[in-house]
Image (tube, rainbow, N blue to C red):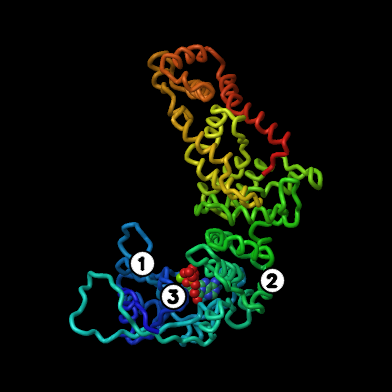
Amino acid sequence: MRTQIPQPVIATLAALEKAGFEAYIVGGCVRDLLLDKPPKDWDITTDARPEALLEIFPDSFYENTFGTVGVKVPPFLPGKTDTREHDIIEVTTYRSESGYTDHRRPDSVTFVSTLEEDLARRDFTMNAIAGKVTQPEKNGQEKSSRTISSEECEITFIDPFHGQEDIRAQKIRAVGVATERFSEDALRMMRGVRLLSELSQAPKGGTKSASPWVIEETTLSAIRSEAKTLSRVSQERIRDEFSRIILSDNAMEGVALLQSTGLLASIIPELEEGVGMSQNLHHIYSVWEHNLRALATCPSQKLEVRLAALLHDVGKPRTKRGEGYRATFYNHDHVGGRMTRAILTRLRYPKPIVDKASLLVDQHLFYYNVGEVTEASVRRLIRRVGLENMDDLMAVRIGDRLGSGVPKAKPYKLRHLEYMIEKVSKDPLSVGMLAIKGTDLMGELGMTPGPMIGAILDVLLAEVIEEPKNNTKPILLERAALLARQDLKLLRKQAQEKIHEERAAEDAKIKKGHWVE
Ligand code: ATP
Ligand code: MG
């Protein structure tokens, strides 16, 4: 195969060969080249030991735990916009792995002497192909070392496990005996599902690929039989693969496959409670299928929003009352919000992701009916959710609606809500938007710094959310002077009630109409 190879990759391979070692490109980059996709990163495998690598590449570092040396090269990878000083090419010494007692990482790494032994320890045949890169004869002038370019090279493949055949047939097949490979490292099963979700990218233009990728049969049945051992893999490794599935074009198919193979039970067992659980007259899908479809139709590409779409009804199985058309799921939004927090915390997602996704699940059921809902209630909704989160909440709701089989993505109701949000977004929605500040209370009313000031501002906010035209300095100061005479506890209670009392009224409407989208 002749193809373009970035200069830093050519230079790294050349430096190894010049020092008398073997060097090949390997793994994901070779797979991507064969698929005619630009590789995300480039990995090199070699018979040089880490100590030798550190000598050949002075600007490199030894990632001790994995026996991999990172070589710093001038930035060349596409698709990254930040101004970074260098990219890393990972160079790994031929090795085999032995003993995975904790199902997380090998107990020890043994260096081996041949490329074939190294390829044999890799997960799937399509990832176990090495490429020997031959530089073309340089004709004429040398390129300046400062320009990062690609050069057309000849690549010869070393492919003892017939990965190219599997790539052509769009098959994901374990290297060697599948059950053994999965019992060595259970994460490989999830990598298989992740690769499937990522590889079956829908071609541009919207229609899905005519022949999707599949997991080869023996490999698939090995995943089924070994699925339980995934529970011994660290949550962080599981999380990283899970996120990639959620963000892929085929997120729904990927998560469905996690469930049907038994892997989901070790990731988010709570979602399985909804499998086969019927809903009520508003729904044609089971709770599980509706969650999946909400993920598939959620228009956002943000991880936290997509997680919220998948988990938005996770609280339904635990709140279901009654059966058949009249079944109800009161409070499933808040129960689901709490479950989402527990699930994502367990999976070690960073706090901002956990906070955002659980807020979106908790608030996904907001009541909105054109004509019935006032501007003040829209301001209260924004106050609860945060103006900066409204687009994301809307994306969850669109997934929720489309995922229930309702044909229009943005029915009139949601479009009207967007208009209302726009309209009230200049109104006071947070303490910072009030016409007076804490310093005014101290300066004009002679108050001393303390919790009383915060409590007064909260009450004032609750009041101007109902009546924005009162957001003027004289009116607020006059009101503050009255409030300053009240008890602190009472004030706090007042602020809370103002914001939440109407919510209770809205919840009641939701219950009354069995309005459980
Ligand atoms: P991508 O970079 O698109 O995520 P990749 O296949 O390159 O895909 P990496 O995690 O970069 O994935 O791994 C590089 C290579 O290392 C893989 O192609 C595979 O050959 C090998 N590999 C990675 N993880 C494992 C594993 N758990 N078990 C066996 N081999 C693995
Ligand atoms: Mg890679």
Say which amino acid is labelled 3: Asp
Q: Earlier in the sequence, mark 1 or mark 3?
A: 3
Label 2 secondary element: helix
For disc 2, does the CB lie below 8 Å from ligand 1? no
- For disc 3, the marked residue is 36
Structural crowding at the residue carrying mark 3, measured as other residues with C-alpha within 10 Å and reported as few (<14), some (14–19) or many (≥20): few
Q: Earlier in the sequence, mark 2 or mark 1?
A: 1
Say which amino acid is labelled 2: Arg
Coordinates of residue 20 in the picture (x, y in percent):
33, 87
Label 1 secondary element: loop
Q: Quadrant of the C terminus?
A: top right
The one of 514 and 452 positioned closer to us in this rendering: 514
435 lies left or right of 166? left
Coordinates of residue 155 in the picture (x, y in percent):
39, 84
- For disc 1, the marked residue is 77
Foreground label between 1 and 3: 3
Q: Quadrant of the N terminus?
A: bottom left
Residue 65 visible in the shown view: no
Q: Residue drawn at (62%, 30%), measured in percent from left and top?
A: 372
Label 3 secondary element: loop
- For disc 2, the marked residue is 224
Q: For the residues marked 2 and 3, what is the alpha-carbon distance in whole angstroms? A: 31 Å
223 lies left or right of 120? right
Q: For the residues marked 2 and 1, what is the alpha-carbon distance in whole angstroms? A: 37 Å
Which residue, as the protein is rendered here, is positioned at the far right?
Answer: 323
Say which amino acid is labelled 1: Leu
Q: Residue drawn at (41%, 71%), measured in percent from left and top?
A: 38
